[in-house]
């Protein structure tokens, strides 16, 4: 299985670029990972570009402030289940400044909220990549994640 992060906006800011690169490389030890950046425009155009590249066998997770919050353990279970299922790709979609068009939300199997807090778009990329890496370490029983 392949993991694809689709993000609306511009290339990674220098503020988060090293962290994103580090966690992308770490995830790459477990599975193929790729980033796709969709240029910001209006929500409908962004949605068309996002949805155009999706296959019916893809599992899509849309990040949205109104989505379901999950613990790290639940996220790890979701990733593990997706890896074991028939999906070709597990795709995480981060919208632009005004969020995702409803058509993307409707296509998603899971709508996920990272937090009740509002984060800068670029920081969400870093948090997402770290959390997916953390999920893989939980799945593999590695000593990165510590349960309290």
Image (cartoon, grey):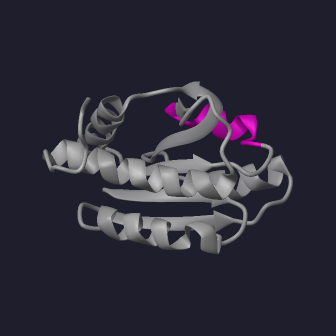
Which quadrant does the N terminus fall into?
bottom left
Please say whether residue 82 is one of the residues in the magenta stretch.
no
**Which portion, as a residue range, is magenta?**
99-110
- The residue positioned 63% from the left and 66% from the top of the image is 37
Left-right relation of 15 to 83? right
Residue 55: where, in percent of width, then height? 50, 52
> Which residue corresponds to the image point at 52% horizontal and 66% vertical from the top-left?
35
Residue 40 visible from this viewpoint: yes
Q: Is residue 111 above or below residue 28?
A: above
Q: Quadrant of residue 130?
A: bottom left
Q: Residue 48's spot in the image, x, y percent?
A: 73, 53
Instruction: State left or right for residue 115 relative to residue 50.
Output: left
Quadrant that contains the C terminus: top left
- The quadrant holding residue 145 is top left
13 to 60, vertically: above or below? below
Q: Position of residue 9 (x, y in %)?
A: 72, 62
Residue 99, picture quadrant: top right
42 over 34 or under it: above or below: above
- The answer to whether one can see residue 55 in this image is no
Residue projecting furthest to the right: 42
Residue ID at (82%, 48%): 44
Where does the image place residue 59, in percent across and percent down from the top left?
Answer: 44, 43
Q: How many badges with numbers are in the image?
A: 0
* Direction from residue 63 to residue 81 in the image, left or right: left
Q: For the view shown, which residue lies furthest in the front direction?
A: 148
Closer to us: 56 or 133: 133
Residue sitting nearer the eye, 106 or 26: 26
Left or right: residue 80 compared with residue 37: left
């Amino acid at each position: 299985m392949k993991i694809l992060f689709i993000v609306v906006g511009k290339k990674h800011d220098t503020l988060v670029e090293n962290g994103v690169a580090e966690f992308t490389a770490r995830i790459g030890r477990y599975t193929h990972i790729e980033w796709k950046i969709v240029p910001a425009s209006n929500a409908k155009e962004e949605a068309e570009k996002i949805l155009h590249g999706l296959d019916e066998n893809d599992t899509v997770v849309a990040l949205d402030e109104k989505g379901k919050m999950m613990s790290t353990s639940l996220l790890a279970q979701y990733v593990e289940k997706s890896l074991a299922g028939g999906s070709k790709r597990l795709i995480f979609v981060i919208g632009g400044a005004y969020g995702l068009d409803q058509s993307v939300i409707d296509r998603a199997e899971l709508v996920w909220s990272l937090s009740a807090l509002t984060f800068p778009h670029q920081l969400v990329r870093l948090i997402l990549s770290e959390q997916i890496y953390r999920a893989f370490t939980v799945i593999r029983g590695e000593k990165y994640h510590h349960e309290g």
